[in-house]
Image (spheres, helix red, strand yellow):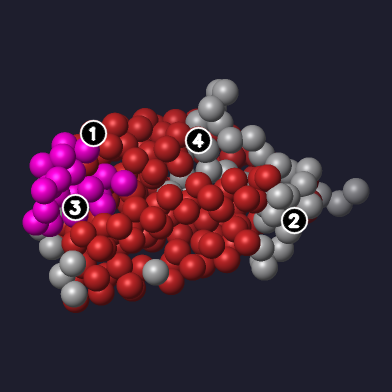
Amino acid sequence: MSPDSDPVEGPDAVPEVAEAPDAGLLTVPNLISIARLGCVPLFLWLLLGREDPLLAGFLLAFLGATDWVDGYIARRFGQVSEIGKILDPTADRIMLLVAVLAIGAAGYVPWWFAGATLAREGVVSVLAVVLGALGARRIDVTWWGKTATFLLMFSYPLFLAAGADHALDDLAWWLAWACGIPGLAIAYYAAWGYLPVARRALAEGRAARQARSTPH
């Protein structure tokens, strides 16, 4: 939902595809990521301009679902690219941050929940920038990070649906919490797992840089 995002060790970590050739910029997954980013202003207009939380929620849920689509296409059809590994989680983070701020400002979600989501995203984003500045190698997105983003990206549309006037608003409220609480817990668990992997990435990045600078 790159400098992201929640790497952990173990069987659930997303395998790297270092041996695969870089597919470049113009790939279907990258175009999907760019299209998702382009829909962010539309989401804001639907929610804050048109004041239609139900339609805005449907759009946000659709954008969250496409996050899994581009990853599948990239792996299935050999369209993995270095720019895509950065673009995809960057799109996730921008969509999530914008959605949380807008939905919180509009009063459709409790501020403590929105604040906990923003705090986690802010810490991970700052750490990613710091690690990159210090020369760490890039850390790929993992299953835990994607799962957390997926659950949160569906909990917020459900909060919007719960705030709209329709027959299933109570059900939407309960489903929002059913996705939101596990999603937030997994997000913090994934962020904690980031720490040892980040230390190793920093050491490996510095070692690689030193090896390149050492004359043979």
Q: Nearer the viewer, mark 3 or mark 2?
A: 3
Q: Is residue 58 visible?
A: yes
User: Residue 107 at x, y = what percent?
Assistant: 10, 58
Q: Nearer the viewer, mark 1 or mark 2?
A: 1
Dot 2: element? loop
In the image: residue 56, left or right of residue 164: right
Q: How many other residues sit within 10 Å of disc 3, few (<14), some (14-19) or many (≥20)?
A: many
User: Pointer 2: what residue?
Assistant: 22
**Three-letter amino acid code at disc 1?**
Ala
Residue drawn at (23%, 48%), measured in percent from left and top? 158
Q: CA distance from mark 4 to mark 1?
A: 19 Å
User: Pointer 3: what residue?
Assistant: 161
Q: Quadrant of residue 40?
A: bottom left
42 inside magenta stretch = no
159 inside magenta stretch = yes
Q: CA distance from mark 3 to mark 2?
A: 40 Å
User: Residue 163 at x, y = what percent?
Assistant: 11, 54
Q: Are marks 1 and 2 in contact (CB under 8 Å)?
A: no
**Three-letter amino acid code at disc 3?**
Ala
Q: Which of the numbered marks, if any, corresponds to residue 143?
A: 4
In the image: residue 159, left or right of residue 206: left
Q: Which of the numbered marks, if any, corresponds to residue 178?
A: 1
**Three-letter amino acid code at disc 2?**
Asp
What range is drawn magenta here? 154-175
